[in-house]
Image (spheres, grey):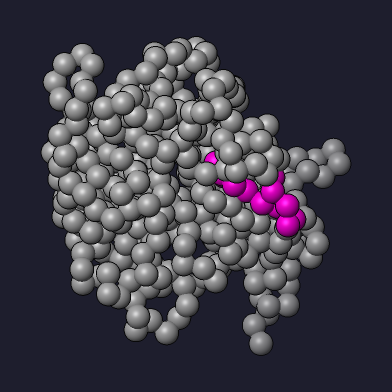
């Protein structure tokens, strides 16, 4: 045995002895691990709730028994190395989130990251019970739709909600019981004009519709105009090309300040007021699963094409990616899939062909609601089965975050995701919402904080 093994480790240096300063051999007594100086850092410092962060350490290595906690939550460690730990944030995190690494019950270091997730649920007093339409604004985002009283199935005017500021107004329609309130509030996507009340024929088979706009939170009545509306509603597809929701047909308004005719273009089967997703970069408006050219009003294609239609159970929840000219749609997977769930499909806006699809995402439901954030370049996927919003990239469909949604309704007629870059928020608006086996007396809106762009 080596003699050196039986003697204390000696370090030559300057040692202090009472009254003497001399060069002596000094014994180096090691510190306990939790007493050693350590430095922890975390990346990224801004992350989605439920997203991955990595903690690095300087001073001494991590050990297999080290535990990572955020508040009362013990975090999942998906990557464990000598000087690095990869963990997932809690799905309910929002705001500054302190993270501690514990060894033997004691913290060996702490870091803080900013998490972005669920902010609040607000119930607006007027109940949107059917179809929600986005209202164009220069600042923020807003929606408009027929207003309903409690469980009544009869619309009583229109409700406008400026989600970014929280301003909301209910406007009574013309107080004439003989007039039909429309089940969908038509909106010009450029000018913001509203078409919300149907008067019927003026005696020459030309229907009239009430027109208005909203300025400074006030309804400005623009009177009656001749359009192709019926009780299901109508609106401009783009410019002078109009679409009627019942029977689903398009026409071009005749020239002139007050056109009295609309030249027929296309007719497809339809019934209730269908939603519209306009993809301006591809000159296409998708109405349910039928795509129309906005410049001509002509039918373009069926969503996914005939081949996919035989294999994919398409959801009606579609969102747009203007930069890439794509639709993102959810579908129930392929018929040969053995795993229940859904896929996310990227579809070419010009012809509807499928460009790429995600792997099957296991779920109890294949009808999630989709939204797209072009600034952060992520797809927001509202899953009713898990009551969460998944954040996925649009290329590989990799999961970036998972946001828990407290106050999530049990069911709804329609849900719409709107991204507001002016306030760095995403809003989920529910119409016809039910909670605890009863209709919600109003319109629930969930707001989610978005990371800085």
The vertical placement of 178 against 451, above or below, is: above
Residue situated in front as seen by the camera: 421 or 124: 124
Quadrant hosting residue 95: top right
The magenta segment: 429-440
Q: Is residue 274 left or right of residue 83?
A: left
Whole-percent x, y for residue 381 in the image? 47, 54
Whole-percent x, y for residue 110 in the image? 68, 48
Which part of the image, by quadrant, shows the N terminus? bottom right
Q: Is residue 372 left or right of residue 236?
A: right
Task: List the single residue furthest toward the bottom.
Answer: 1
The vertical placement of 321 against 354, above or below, is: above
Q: Is residue 139 visible?
A: yes
Residue at 21%, 72% in the rendered image:
307
The vertical placement of 436 against 229, above or below, is: below
Magenta highlight on residue 437 = yes
Residue situated in front as seen by the camera: 384 or 441: 441
Residue at 37%, 37% in the rendered image:
230
Whole-percent x, y for residue 347 in the image? 25, 57
Q: Is residue 439 left or right of residue 215?
A: right
Residue situated in front as seen by the camera: 431 or 360: 431
Whole-percent x, y for residue 407 in the image? 69, 48
Q: Is residue 47 visible?
A: no
Residue at 15%, 34% in the rendered image:
263
Task: List the single residue furthest toward the right.
Answer: 18
Residue situated in front as seen by the camera: 299 or 155: 155
Magenta highlight on residue 315 = no
The vertical placement of 61 against 453, above or below, is: below
Residue at 42%, 38% in the rendered image:
231
């Amino acid at each position: 045995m080596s003699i050196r093994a039986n003697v204390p480790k000696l370090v030559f240096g300057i040692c202090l002895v009472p009254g003497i300063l001399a060069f002596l051999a000094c014994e180096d007594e090691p510190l306990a691990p939790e007493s050693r100086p350590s430095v922890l850092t975390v990346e990224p410092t801004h992350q989605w709730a439920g997203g991955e962060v990595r903690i690095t350490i300087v001073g001494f290595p991590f050990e297999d028994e080290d535990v990572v906690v955020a508040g009362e939550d013990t975090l999942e460690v998906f990557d464990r190395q000598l000087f690095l730990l990869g963990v997932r944030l809690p799905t309910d995190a929002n705001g500054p989130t302190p993270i501690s690494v514990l060894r033997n019950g004691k913290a060996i270091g702490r870091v803080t990251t900013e998490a972005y997730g669920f902010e609040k649920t607000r119930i607006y007093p007027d109940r949107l019970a059917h179809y929600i339409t986005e209202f164009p604004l220069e600042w923020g985002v807003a929606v408009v739709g027929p207003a309903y009283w409690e469980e009544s199935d009869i619309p009583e005017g229109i409700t406008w909600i400026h989600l970014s500021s929280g301003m909301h107004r209910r406007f009574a329609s013309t107080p004439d019981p003989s007039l039909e309130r429309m089940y969908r509030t038509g909106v010009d996507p450029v000018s913001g004009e509203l078409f919300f009340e149907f008067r019927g024929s003026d005696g020459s088979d030309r229907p009239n519709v009430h027109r208005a706009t909203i300025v400074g939170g006030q309804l400005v009545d623009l009177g009656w105009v001749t359009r192709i509306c019926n009780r299901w509603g109508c609106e401009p597809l783009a410019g002078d090309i109009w679409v009627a929701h019942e029977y689903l047909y398009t026409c071009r308004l005749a020239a002139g300040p007050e056109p009295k005719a609309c030249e027929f273009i296309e007719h497809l089967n339809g019934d209730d007021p269908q939603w519209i997703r306009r993809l301006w970069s591809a000159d296409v408006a998708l109405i349910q699963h039928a795509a129309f050219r906005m410049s001509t009003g002509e039918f373009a294609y069926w969503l996914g094409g005939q081949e996919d239609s035989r294999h994919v159970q398409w959801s009606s929840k579609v969102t747009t990616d203007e930069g890439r000219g794509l639709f993102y749609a959810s579908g129930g997977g392929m018929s040969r899939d053995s795993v229940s769930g859904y896929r996310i499909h990227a579809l070419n806006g010009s012809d509807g062909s499928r460009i790429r699809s995600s792997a099957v995402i296991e779920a109890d439901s294949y009808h999630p609601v989709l939204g797209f954030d072009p600034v952060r370049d992520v797809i927001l996927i509202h899953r009713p089965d898990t009551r969460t919003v998944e954040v996925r990239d649009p290329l590989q469909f990799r999961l970036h975050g998972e946001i828990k949604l407290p106050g999530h309704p049990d069911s709804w007629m329609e849900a719409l995701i709107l991204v507001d870059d002016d306030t760095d928020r995403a809003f989920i608006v529910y119409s016809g919402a039910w909670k605890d086996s009863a209709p919600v007396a109003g319109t629930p809106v969930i707001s989610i904080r978005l990371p800085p762009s």
